[in-house]
Image (cartoon, rainbow, N blue to C red):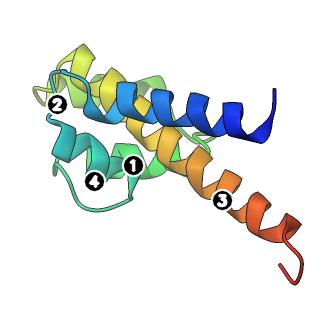
Amino acid sequence: MGAGRVDEAVARLRAAILGAAGVLSPEVRRAIAGREPADPRLDAYAAVVAGGGSTLTGRQTAELLDAGSSEDEVFEATLAAALGAADRVRSAGLRALRPGG
């Protein structure tokens, strides 16, 4: 897949995760992806996911659900945080590949 097609695929993925209708508003999902405060219930969870998720436990997810977050909210926050992290890594990699990067 050429670079242009990859960029198109990434743009479609971003639009689907951050802009499509969902339980969380697009503004909240975009803030989560950008590591900005978005929803006090989800911010700490999103930071763990964005950091790679290696320390994420089922207990943390259960606590979100117990605090009133829906499974759909947790799922959408997970996708937004992971997408934001992947975008940051991809951008850093592309910058490193540029001459003088």
Q: Mark 2 points at which residue?
A: 24
Helix, strand or loop for disc 2: loop
Q: Disc 2 or 4, which lies upstream in sequence? A: 2
Residue 6, located in which quarter of the rendered image?
top right
Callout 4 crowding tier (Cα within 10 Å): few <14, some 14–19, many ≥20: many
How far apart marks 1 and 3 lie (CA) works out to 14 Å
Helix, strand or loop for disc 3: helix
Q: Name the residue under label 3.
A: 91
- Horizontal and vertical percent position of residue 83: 50, 39
Q: Name the residue under label 4.
A: 31
Asked if residue 91 lies left or right of residue 96, the reply is left
Q: Is residue 60 visible?
A: no
How far apart marks 2 and 1 lie (CA) works out to 12 Å
Question: CB under 8 Å between callouts 4 and 1?
Answer: yes
Question: CB under 8 Å between callouts 2 and 4?
Answer: no
Check disc 1 and give the amino acid type. Ala
Residue 78, located in which quarter of the rendered image?
top left
